[in-house]
Amino acid sequence: MKNVLLSADGPLSVYSVPDDVADSLWEYCLEFIDWLHYSPDAEAYVRDTSAGPIICFDESDFIDYLNQYVYQEQSTLVAALSSMTPPEEYKYLPHFNF
């Protein structure tokens, strides 16, 4: 397991994820976004609005997706940071902002 930084236009969170996910974080995040648009299992994330349907999610939903649909090895929250700027100890981790 390796640590990564994830966010959704807010403060960063550090998660421990399988090595493959950390090493290819961008690809896994894009696969998740694709899954949100096309999987019937993603219906819980769709909200109807006056402008039409929108998809609502954040980084914790990505972790739920990994845990439920992709890996048996469970990803976990390591730290919820209070800033969008990582402290020195996390500065060089892979990062994705949804």
Image (cartoon, helix red, strand yellow):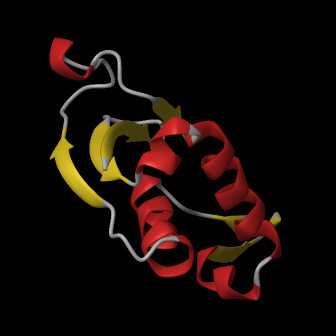
Residue occupying image coordinates x 18% and y 32%? 82
Q: Is residue 83 left or right of residue 27?
A: left
Which quadrant of the figure contains the C terminus? top right
Residue occupying image coordinates x 73% and y 68%? 35
- Residue 33 position, x and y percent, is 70, 57
Residue occupying image coordinates x 51% and y 49%? 21
Residue occupying image coordinates x 51% and y 37%? 23
Q: Is residue 33 left or right of residue 22?
A: right
- Residue 30 position, x and y percent, is 70, 48
89 above or below 2?
above
Q: Quadrant of residue 31?
A: bottom right
Q: Quadrant of residue 37?
A: bottom right
- Residue 77 position, x and y percent, is 23, 55
Q: Is residue 17 left or right of residue 78?
A: right
Q: Is residue 67 left or right of residue 85?
A: right
Q: Nearer the viewer, residue 59 or 17?
A: 17
Q: Nearer the viewer, residue 14 or 44?
A: 14
64 above or below 68?
above
Q: Nearer the viewer, residue 65 or 56?
A: 65
**Total numbered circles:** 0
- Residue 14 position, x and y percent, is 27, 41
